[in-house]
Image (cartoon, rainbow, N blue to C red):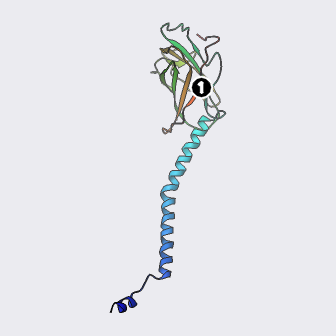
């Protein structure tokens, strides 16, 4: 009797098996193109913007200059603090800059600053040769440079400045670091 039951049992047809495999493959491909591909493309777009923003020729960089990028330990404006001058250059890259975050470090500690276009509320930072109390900050435009003056630093020594570029839309690019020498000819 058991043999008769097994004789009438039919297995899955090879044709149906192939059709199911094709259906599963198509469904997987649709999922990849619908969800995964746009996610990868978005990440690549963000990476491309940061690549432009960090490229030496196209993006933001701190220029080495012994007068315009340096540490002045003989601060004439605030004898209790120190000054750092940073010449920040912007290349011809096509990206929308929101702000530049600056961290000045030395002696095991650091002080943080945020450079935002038009900001009048920035403490202890302004464009060099601007009237500190009334002039809003101006970030460098394409192909231009601006020197920023950071005053009131309480660091005993200054070794480097790190900068992080924040693009419009909030994309934050990898931090870069530049060494800061002592000024040969202090600006103030």
User: In the structure shown, which secondary structural element does the residue marked by tag 1 occupy?
Assistant: strand
* Residue furthest front as drawn: 2
Give the camera-side residue of 116 and 165. Answer: 165
Q: Nearer the viewer, residue 156 or 81?
A: 156
Structural crowding at the residue carrying mark 1, measured as other residues with C-alpha within 10 Å and reported as few (<14), some (14–19) or many (≥20): some
Residue 136 position in % (x across, y down): 50, 21
User: Can you say whether 167 is above or below 114 in the image?
Assistant: below
Q: Quadrant of residue 50?
A: top right
Q: Toward which corner of the image does residue 56 lie, by quadrant?
A: top right
Residue 130 showing in the rendered view: no
Disc 1: which residue: 178
On-image quarter of the C terminus: top right
Say which residue appears at 65% left-offset and 19% top-offset.
65
State the residue in front, 91 or 118: 91
Q: Classify the position of the N terminus by image quarter.
A: bottom left
Task: Say whether residue 97 is left or right of residue 7.
Answer: right
């Amino acid at each position: 009797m058991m043999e008769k039951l097994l004789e009438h049992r039919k297995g899955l047809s090879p044709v149906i098996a192939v059709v199911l495999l094709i259906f599963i493959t198509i469904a997987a491909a649709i999922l990849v193109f619908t969800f995964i591909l746009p996610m990868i493309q978005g990440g690549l777009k963000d990476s491309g913007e940061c690549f432009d923003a960090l490229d030496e020729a196209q993006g933001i960089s701190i220029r080495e200059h012994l007068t315009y990028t340096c540490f002045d330990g003989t601060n004439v404006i605030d004898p209790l603090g120190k000054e750092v001058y940073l010449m920040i250059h912007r290349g011809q890259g096509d990206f929308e800059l929101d702000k530049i975050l600056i961290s000045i470090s030395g002696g095991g500690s650091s002080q943080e600053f945020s450079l935002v276009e038009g900001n009048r509320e920035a403490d202890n930072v302004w464009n060099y040769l601007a009237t500190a109390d009334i002039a809003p900050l101006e970030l460098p435009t394409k192909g231009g440079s601006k020197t920023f003056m950071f005053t009131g630093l309480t660091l005993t020594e200054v070794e480097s400045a790190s900068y992080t570029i924040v693009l419009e839309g909030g994309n934050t690019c990898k931090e870069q670091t530049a060494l800061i020498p002592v000024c040969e000819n202090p600006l103030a």
